[in-house]
Image: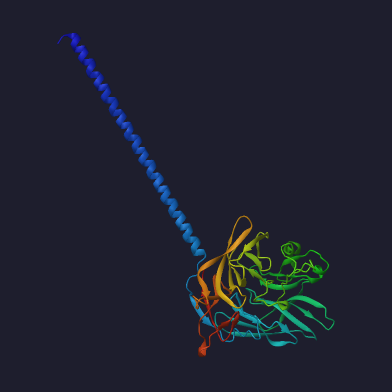
Amino acid sequence: MNRLDFVSDLRIRLTKTRQTFKAVRCLFSSYVRLERAFQLFGLALIGSLSLVMLTFSAARDSRQLISLPPPWQQKTFVNAFNLESYSFPQAANGYLWSFRERLTDNERHAIRIISLQDERVTDIPFGPKDAGTLWVNDVTITADHEVLVGGSSSAGDGQLANFVVKLDFVGNVLGVFDIGSLEPGRVCSDTQGGFWTIGQDKNAETSNSNYDMLRKYSSAGVLLKSYLASDAVYSQLVPRSLENKNAYDLNLIRRFHDPERSPGNIFLVCGNSSVGAYISQTKTWVEVTDDRVLQTWTVALPAKSTGVTGVVLLNERRVYASMRIFSKDGKGDFMRGLYALQFSQDGTASWATVDGALMSRASIPEGFARLVGRDGPSLVYLRNGYATINGTMFCCSPGYYSGNPPLFWSRP
């Protein structure tokens, strides 16, 4: 081989080597890109799976928030549901209580209190000392084991005096608080030792004056702050008749309406860190938090003919209510259930059905009946279809309970 052929052959070999190297480099580059693509795909897959798991977890947590576990406790309290003489019982701060709504003398058994722990019964005397009539609109038990009574009294001249009275468990008067012209329809005790009222001022309404309906007081009965302007509430109402456009059907006072069926029913509840009120007539939930700011939501009911029978506020925006959904003909009721309030950012809210807490006369005769209150983190409630001592059934007609129905405890 001469030198010319050798050089030519060397060029050919170098060209092939260069091409081979380029091909190898391209192949390696493709492998790197493929490996990177697989890595990105893996990361994307892991992210998608994580998102799915988070979504599933959030959905699961959401379901847990609106589910009612089986009761962890059941107790029967003798003579707790004497509705012919006493109001429907309420439960909070370790006690179950009910009261007589109209008193004309110092009644020995005006308020009945039963310990949820040892079932001890305490009857407290209360009533007007002089001639006249005393109306009790609401009673609550404080965390300090004191009794707050809200209502009004009338003397011989017919003039009303509104009050909140603080009693001990013997019946001794610890304080009488004159709250002016606002008649308290509901009373609750907060965790700071103070109390709240919500009610109506008939004098202000007669003169078309605006006033605050929700008020906070210290433990000594000093007004600290007021909320919920009456004009804002009345603006959501429809006049009862075209002839009298100023006659609005709003009544928050117990003695003027049937608390089971009246659309004017109202609930005031003190939670762990906030205070809330539900006004049935306007379908409104209002809540005041620790920063003392009032927020308002317009609430959608689960059905048109719905009656709220009980409300419990555990923590901020953690609200439960028992309801009766009436039949279309307005006679009786065909469903009872427990609902949780779900809030939206646009100022609206809706009642969501709580899983495992429905009762229907036709399909679920034994089930949730009605909230009675709370005991710490637990809801205290009644169920339908349970026999009492001597075989007496306790749920026979809408809103009526006889005998000694058992109470149930569940932690939602």
Which residue shows up at 64% across the image and 69% down it? 269
Labels in figure, total? 0
Q: Hey, which quadrant is residue 86 in on the image?
A: bottom right
Image position of 348 (left or right of 353): right
Work out whether residue 210 or residue 264 is closer to the camera in this orientation and state it: 264
| Residue 382 pos. (x, y %) | 55, 78
Q: Residue 19 location in percent, x, y? A: 27, 23
Position of the N terminus by quadrant: top left
| Outermost residue, front side | 329
Of 148 and 317, which appears nearest the observer?
317
Q: Is residue 3 above or below residue 327?
A: above
Confirm whether residue 255 shows in the render.
Answer: yes
Q: Work out whether 119 lies above or below 353.
A: below
Q: Where in the figure is residue 116, as x and y percent of width and height?
A: 56, 79
- The residue that appears at 51% across and 64% down in the rendered structure is 65
Relative to residue 254, is residue 93 drawn left or right?
left
Between residue 256 and residue 138, name the one nearer to us: 256
Q: Residue furthest left?
A: 1
Vertically, is 107 above or below 368? below
Could you tell me residue 61's position as x and y percent?
48, 61
Q: Quadrant of residue 194?
A: bottom right
Q: How is the image coloured?
A: rainbow
Q: Is residue 246 above or below residue 391?
A: above
Residue at the right extreme of this rendering: 157
Residue 226 visible at all: no
* Residue 271, quarter of the rendered image: bottom right
